[in-house]
Image (spheres, rainbow, N blue to C red):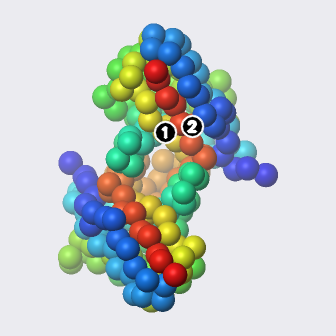
Amino acid sequence: GDSVTQMEGPVTLSEEAFLTINCTYTATGYPSLFWYVQYPGEGLQLLLKATKADDKGSNKGFEATYRKETTSFHLEKGSVQVSDSAVYFCALITNNNDMRFGAGTRLTVKP
Amino acid sequence: DTAVSQTPKYLVTQMGNDKSIKCEQNLGHDTMYWYKQDSKKFLKIMFSYNNKELIINETVPNRFSPKSPDKAHLNLHINSLELGDSAVYFCASSQSTGVSDTQYFGPGTRLTVL
């Protein structure tokens, strides 16, 4: 079935470091792809999304490009801040509107 | 104004009890969802309703029963609570059932069963 695999954490970086969180997917058809973020003690917030191949989603300095050839949607940010510390979830929506999430990657950014 | 709200935020109860979690969205969306997030942060869909009709019902014990009195509300009732039901439950909504429709999540309800 459709699924999402993302790199397991935790990931610990120093402030201003470059961030990559890998995400790959398996799906029939053409899913939409999402990154959600969950800050400590809070609910999920949409970070960015892409709905077709080669689309690039971006928000708050984060970017991810929908790569159909490698079935990937890796999340990147050029310079992380302490306030980016959170759990990041890659997700897709299947053809029957079922949202599938990856296991989540915890990011800790140290000053 | 909160777009998707859930009550209560925390719920602590004994095994065997029956409890409900309420969800409301003021976005005018047609579709609502319930997700369960376990202790390892893994999110799994439980139910989905579109215009008050059930469209997704994953393999969930029949002790869990969703109820949608109108498009803006999707409540989750749980009978005979078990220890394994302890988790964070998230409600979400989307405009419709389209594959590109963003789902907006509530703040979550942390359920602890003692």
Say which residue appears at 56% left-offset and 25% top-offset.
Answer: B12
As drawn, B59 above or below B17: below
Marked residue chain, label 2: B
As drawn, B18 above or below A56: above
What percent of the width, then of the height, locates residue A110? 47, 77
Q: Residue under label 1, please give it.
A: B88
As drawn, B85 above or below A33: above
Q: Is residue A2 left or right of residue B96?
A: left
Say few, some or many: other residues with alpha carbon within 10 Å of mark 2 (under 14 / 14 to 19 / 20 or more): many
Viewer-closest of B103 and A47: A47
Give the Cα distance between marks 1 and 2: 5 Å
Q: Are marks 1 and 2 in contact (CB under 8 Å)?
A: yes
Viewer-closest of B30 and A63: A63
The part of the image, by quadrant, that contains residue B99 is bottom left
Q: Amino acid at mark 1?
A: Val
Q: Residue B109's mark?
A: 2
